[in-house]
Amino acid sequence: MPLLAGMLAAAFALQVAGEAGWQAAASWSKATLGLTPAAWTAGEYWRLASYGLIHSTTNLFHLGLVLAAVLGPGMALARELGPRLPLGAWVVGQLVGGLCWLGFHRDAGELHFGATAGAYALLAAYAVRHPDRVFRLLVCFVVPLRLRPRTVLLALLAGEAFFLLIGEVLQRALPFAPAASAHLAGAVAGWLALRLSRPAPSERPELGPAQIDEPGPEPGIDPRAELDRILDKINQTGLGSLSPAERRTLAAARDLLSRP
């Protein structure tokens, strides 16, 4: 995922440098790399890969939000499941998002660019994996907020569904025109990528015969301190990161607490 973030940042740096040295570079890069119905009709299918390499140079939030998704949810998924799944979710999100956008836009002059569909794919995959993991955010470095990935994703999807209906289905004028069809399709692709790759870990670990034979905590270790360490590990990296011995300790503590 750092390689993907570096590639997007490098492409953006080249785009900015080109526009600074050549006034027509902005229109040239979008006309050459961006996704348009006219280019698709002409057989330039490779633009499904290139349109995610360019972003708005006047609105830094465009690239900033994409990099935040890659280095946030994307990196977290890569540490837990390996880089193949989040990278695949991003690629599929971009491809499906671009195709869905083309389905809603037939005017030859329309243009779409940016990797926001891939960012939505990563956010959706993370929200499916850890729907209720709480993270804290300081608004303006003052107001604390406690958010859950599922809540954030549903709020974003509700807004995108509104823009899809008003701007792309009913074709009414809006103050700005987000590519809601691409964003929603990217989120669906991320959700499917995680669901089809491997199931989320169960809340209650299942212990097999090989795990029962695993040794427990080393002699001399306080069981309560060991349990606190395991709970901290679950909070930081998820239940799937526990070793067989740690799962056995957790199950023993659960059984002890359930006794009358």
Image (cartoon, rainbow, N blue to C red):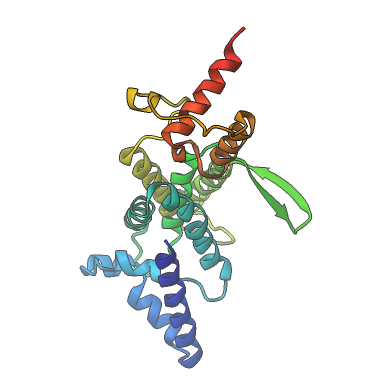
Residue extending furthest toward the right? 142
Q: Could you say which is closer to the camera, residue 237 or residue 70?
A: 237
Q: x and y percent of residue 114 in the render?
A: 43, 66
| Residue 150 located left or right of residue 118 | right
Q: Could you say which is closer to the camera, residue 154 or residue 218?
A: 218
Please report the residue visible at 54 percent of the width from the left and 58 percent of the height from the top.
173
Total marks placed: 0
| Residue 219 located left or right of residue 205 | right
| Residue 64 located left or right of residue 52 | right
Q: x and y percent of residue 21 in the render?
A: 48, 92
Residue extending furthest toward the front? 220
Q: Answer whether residue 57 is visible to the viewer in this image.
A: yes
Q: Quadrant of residue 234?
A: top right
Q: Answer whether residue 112 is visible to the viewer in this image.
A: no
- Up the image or down, 57 lies above or below 160; here it is below
Residue extending furthest toward the top? 260
Q: Could you say which is closer to the camera, residue 3 or residue 257?
A: 257
Please report the residue visible at 54 percent of the width from the left and 16 percent of the height from the top.
255
Residue extending furthest toward the left? 43
- Up the image or down, 14 lies above or below 236; here it is below
Please report the residue visible at 59 percent of the width from the left and 33 percent of the height from the top.
220
Instruction: State the quadrant of the N terminus.
Output: bottom left
Q: Quadrant of residue 197?
A: top left
Q: x and y percent of residue 154 in the render?
A: 54, 41
- Up the image or down, 68 lies above or below 163; here it is below
Instruction: State the quadrant of the C terminus.
Output: top right
Please report the residue visible at 39 percent of the width from the left and 47 percent of the height from the top.
81
